[in-house]
Image: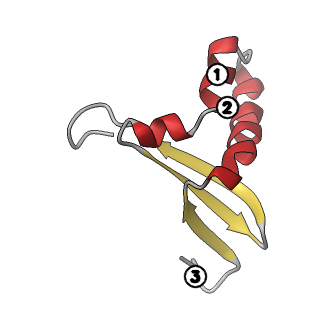
Amino acid sequence: MKFNNSNICFHEYEKKFDKDFFVLNKAWIEESWILEESDKKDLLNPKKIIDNGGQVFFAVDNQITIGTVAMIKSSNNIF
């Protein structure tokens, strides 16, 4: 999906984005907190979010992943 005729496209999770998911999330976490082992475990396995009924999206600009967001399922119809 393209956004406002720009080069930014949005993608659902694919394994090829695993490293980007880790790097992008690690960066914002370390701005305010210490990245803990439990965080690393979660960030190294974004597929777990999908397997539990959620979804992960990626913003890609000219083949560079510039953002990510996860919808983590809390309960039926609540993310």
Percent of width and height locating residue 36? 70, 13
Specify the quadrant of the image occupied by residue 34. Answer: top right
Residue type at tag 2: Leu
Tags 3 and 2 in contact by the CB under 8 Å rule? no
User: Relative to 9, is 52 on the left or the right?
Assistant: left
Q: Which residue is drawn at 35% across and 41% down?
A: 53
Q: Residues within 10 Å of mark 2 (few under 14, many from 20)?
A: some
- Dot 2 and dot 1 residues touching (CB under 8 Å): yes
Q: Mark 2 points at which residue?
A: 44
Is residue 78 or residue 54 the one in the foreground?
54
CA separation in Å, label 2 and label 1:
5 Å
SS category of the residue bearing label 3: loop
Contact check, label 3 and label 1, Cβ < 8 Å: no
Q: Answer with mark 3 or mark 2, whichever residue precedes in sequence.
A: 3
Where does the C terminus fall, quadrant-wise?
top left
Q: Which residue reaches farthest left? A: 76
Q: Tag 1: residue type?
A: Lys
Considering only order in the chain, which callout, 1 or 3, is on the residue closer to the N terminus?
Answer: 3
Name the residue at 53% across, 76% down.
1
- Give the side of residue 22 with respect to residue 1, left or right: right
| Residue count near mark 1 (Cα–Cα under 10 Å), binned few <14, some 14–19, many ≥20 | few
Q: Which residue corresponds to mark 1? A: 41
Few, some or many residues within 10 Å of mark 3 (<14, 14–19, 20+): few
Q: Please determine whether, in this image, residue 34 is positioned above or below residue 52.
A: above
SS at circle 1: helix
Q: Of circles 3 and 1, which is in front? A: 1
Pointer 3 residue: 4
Residue 28, above or below 60? above
The local secondary structure at tag 2 comes to: loop
